[in-house]
Image (tube, grey):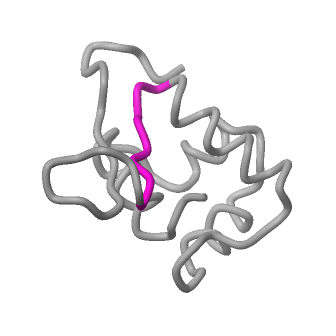
Amino acid sequence: MITANQLRAARALLGIDQKTLAEMAGVSVPTIQRMEASEGDVRGIVDSLMKVVNALDRAGIELIGERARSDRGGRGVRIRHLSQKLN
């Protein structure tokens, strides 16, 4: 699962707005807005959520899960490739 905070942080790392993420994922801007307005884990249609997660993955974003190995624990995001084009 991805949280609303992770989604906003991923966009910030990529330097993109909601419209750009929606275009990358093939979903509507209101879908991204609803996802980012979620409390905790993003809620929505699984297909739309997977499109967004896959778009972030293609852009070089790695989502760090709650129990994933990291130095401090907790959820987060990191970018794998700074030079990769978004389109």
Q: In the current view of this chain or complex, which residue is farthest to the bottom?
A: 39
Depth check: 77 or 29 in front? 77
Quadrant (top left, top right, bottom left, bottom right) of the C terminus: top right
Quadrant (top left, top right, bottom left, bottom right) of the N terminus: bottom right
Q: Is residue 80 left or right of residue 31?
A: left
Q: In the current view of this chain or complex, which residue is farthest to the left?
A: 71
Task: Give me the residue at 73% from left, 44% from top.
Answer: 50
Is residue 10 located in the magenta-colored stretch of the structure?
no
Residue 57 x/y as whole percent: 52, 30
Task: Give me the residue at 41% from left, 16% from top.
Answer: 85
Q: Which residues are magenta?
A: 59-66
Task: Give me the residue at 24% from left, 60% from top.
Answer: 73
Q: Work out whether 30 lies above or below 72.
A: below
Residue 81 x/y as whole percent: 30, 19
* Quarter-of-image position of residue 44: bottom right
Q: Work out whether 16 lies above or below 1.
A: above
Task: Give me the residue at 85% from left, 48% from top.
Answer: 47
Is residue 61 located in the magenta-colored stretch of the structure?
yes
Depth check: 79 or 68 in front? 68
Residue 32 x/y as whole percent: 64, 62
Depth check: 4 or 69 in front? 69
Q: Work out whether 31 lies above or below 22.
A: below
Query: How many numbered badges does the structure rendering display?
Result: 0
Q: Is residue 65 left or right of residue 52?
A: left
* Quarter-of-image position of residue 13: top left
Q: Work out whether 72 lies above or below 57.
A: below
Q: Is residue 13 left or right of residue 59?
A: left
Residue 49 x/y as whole percent: 72, 53
Q: Is residue 66 left or right of residue 49?
A: left
